[in-house]
């Protein structure tokens, strides 16, 4: 008794049989390769607005400012080429050096307090709670503009009517002229900006902490490590690249402080808060010395570039200890 085959044998040659069989993955790869050739114009279309903004609002003003730094220009007459005279004047200008000193003082206070506070807030958010509501509350001051924040704190710290001094007087202490005294003015402005920016900085650090594997903390707990030891041995080394980038951004922003000074002290008292950006603004739009203001702006650009490169190398921002 014979059993019939379930399917007749193929009469096609082996080569034809292989050619009719579907080839796994080739069609998808061909489609992906073919589709990739059309991404260039689309990518250029998306990048074009940002590139246009960069060229119009950043690159061109920078090149124009460098050009004007070698001229005498007051908007009323054409620029007059004077070579390095503006830079020689800047070197001999005591107000410039005093403004740079005030700016450096502000930067040190702002960076020191803001970094430590932001790091503490980020660690607490990561180790104790990850509530989105708390993160929103922490970020709330950053949603306020610098001008509004400056005006609010100006009212609150007013020597006679401010609620801050009312509380101090209620405790039986002498009122403190926070924004009217040469000793208190710069630290007060620095702390106002710390209050506004610390939440944003903390969330940047919190994002960096999220990249650290929890397995490391669990293994350290098994070995009996305390929270402080885990912070020193795990958190800080692995957070270093993010912390370095945050420091670079914060330093650059701190050197460009202007609006808080403009609405609170106006550079006073007795030039105690006359930061470099405010002095540049006064030279350009107050005394119409645009050439000299451009020279100081170029000097600030050089200083910030040097500080950024130095920070990047010292902190090894481009390297990570995560395997």
Image (cartoon, helix red, strand yellow):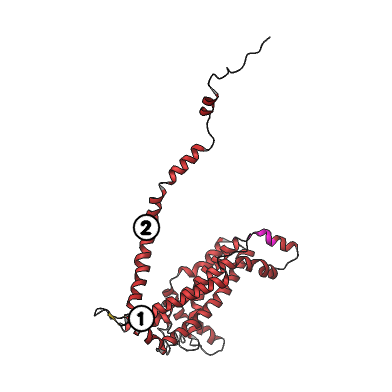
The vertical placement of 47 against 203, above or below, is: above
Q: Secondary structure at mark 2?
A: helix
- Residue 244 location (% of width, % of height): 55, 69
Q: Quadrant of residue 231?
A: bottom right
Q: Label 2: which residue? A: 48
Name the foreground residue: 97 vs 224: 97
Q: Horizontally, is 259 left or right of 312 in the view?
A: left
For the point 63% across and 13% down, which residue is it?
4
Q: Residues within 10 Å of mark 1 (few under 14, many from 20)?
A: many
Q: Quadrant of residue 96?
A: bottom left
Q: Quadrant of the C terminus?
A: bottom right
Residue 214 is tagged as none
**Where 306 falls versus 55 (above or below)?**
below
Give residue 293's position: percent from left, percent from top.
35, 80
Residue 252 on the magenta span: no
Name the residue at the left extreme: 77
Q: Which residue is mark 1?
A: 293
Query: Furthest residue to the top?
Result: 1
In this picture, which residue range is highlighted in magenta? 211-217
> Tag 1's secondary structure?
helix
- The residue located at (68%, 61%) in the rendering is 216
């Amino acid at each position: 008794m014979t059993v019939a085959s379930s399917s007749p044998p193929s009469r096609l040659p082996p080569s034809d049989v292989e050619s009719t069989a579907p080839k796994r993955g080739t069609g998808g790869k061909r489609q992906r390769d073919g589709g990739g050739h059309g991404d260039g114009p689309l990518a250029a279309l998306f990048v074009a607005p940002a590139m246009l903004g960069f060229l119009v609002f950043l690159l061109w003003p920078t090149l124009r400012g460098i050009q004007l730094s070698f001229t005498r220009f007051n908007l009323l007459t054409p620029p007059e080429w004077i070579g390095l005279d503006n830079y020689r004047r800047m070197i001999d200008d005591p107000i410039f050096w005093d403004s740079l000193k005030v700016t450096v003082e502000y930067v040190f206070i702002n960076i020191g307090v803001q970094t430590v506070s932001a790091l503490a807030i980020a660690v607490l958010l990561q180790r104790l709670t990850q509530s989105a509501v708390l993160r929103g509350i922490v970020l709330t001051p950053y949603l306020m503009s610098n001008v509004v924040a400056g005006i609010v704190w100006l009212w609150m710290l007013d020597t006679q009517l401010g609620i801050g001094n009312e509380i101090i007087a209620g405790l039986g202490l002498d009122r403190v002229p926070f924004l009217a005294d040469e000793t208190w003015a710069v630290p007060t402005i620095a702390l106002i900006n710390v209050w506004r920016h610390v939440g944003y900085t903390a969330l940047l650090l919190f994002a960096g902490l999220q990249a650290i594997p929890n397995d490391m903390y669990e293994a350290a707990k098994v070995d009996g490590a305390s929270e402080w030891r885990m912070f020193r041995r795990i958190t800080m080394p692995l957070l270093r690249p993010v912390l370095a980038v945050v420091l670079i951004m914060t330093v650059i922003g701190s050197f460009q402080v202007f609006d808080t000074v403009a609405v609170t002290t106006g550079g006073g008292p007795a030039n105690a808060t006359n930061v470099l950006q405010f002095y540049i603004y006064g030279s350009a739009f107050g005394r119409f010395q645009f050439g000299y203001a451009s020279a100081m702006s170029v000097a600030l650009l050089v200083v910030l570039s040097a500080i950024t490169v130095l920070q990047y190398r010292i902190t090894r921002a481009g390297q990570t200890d995560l395997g």
